[in-house]
Amino acid sequence: MSVSKIDLLNKQFSRRMFGYSRMEVDQFMLELAEVLGDAADSRKGLQKKIKKLEQAVKEYRQRDETLRDTLMSTQKMVDDLKVTAGKEAQLIIDEARSKADTMVQKGHNRLAQIHEEIEGLKRQRSQFEIQLKGLLKSHLEMLDMSDPEKEKVEELESKVKYLKKVD
């Protein structure tokens, strides 16, 4: 049963001698006590439910805060990792470029050294050719030169031939 404020204000009791009907008032008081008791029980139940819901909201807010903190920490870590990875990548690239430059420089130095060796070998070849030509020329000159013994032999041979002819 429910009793509203309007019901209370509009309730009229029958009159009897010495005031209102005692039975009606007692009956109404029992109804009101029951309604107020139900309302009080309902209120207590609702207050307990509100406390539980407030506790749940508090827990959810704590979880939300924890999740936000975790998310922010994770985002910061990811950002830090990105920065660190970028720096490491740049260091690796710089080191690779440095090694490549060093290798290219060594290659250029080796190429210059090989060119110098080739030029040195060409000079040695030219000197060898000049010396060989000079040696050959001197040997030819020596062969072409008349040797006094050779001339004597040739003279004797010609005399022998002459004598053979005369005979």
Image (cartoon, helix red, strand yellow):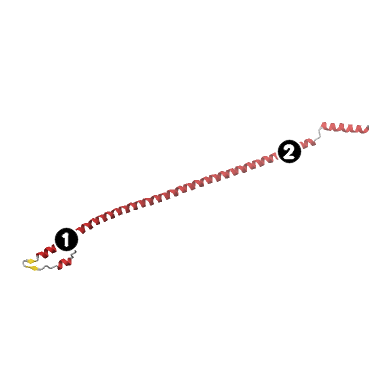
Residue drawn where x is 40% and y is 50% of the image? 78
Left/right placement of residue 142 relative to residue 37 reads right
Determine crowd level at label 1: few under 14, some 14-19, many 20+ residues with C-alpha closer than 10 A.
some
* Image vertical order of residue 11 relative to residue 85, above or below: below
* Residue at the farthest left position: 18
Quick check: 43 left or right of 88? Answer: left
Q: Secondary structure at mark 2?
A: helix
Residue 142, quarter of picture:
top right
The image shows residue 164, relative to residue 111, as above or below, that is above
Q: CA distance from mark 2 to mark 1?
A: 146 Å
Q: Secondary structure at mark 1?
A: helix
Comparing labels 2 and 1, the label whose residue is closer to the camera: 1
Q: Residue furthest right?
A: 167
What kind of residue is marked 2?
Gly
Instruction: Residue 69 in the image: state x and y as whole percent.
Output: 34, 51
- Identify the residue shown where x is 39% and y is 49%: 77
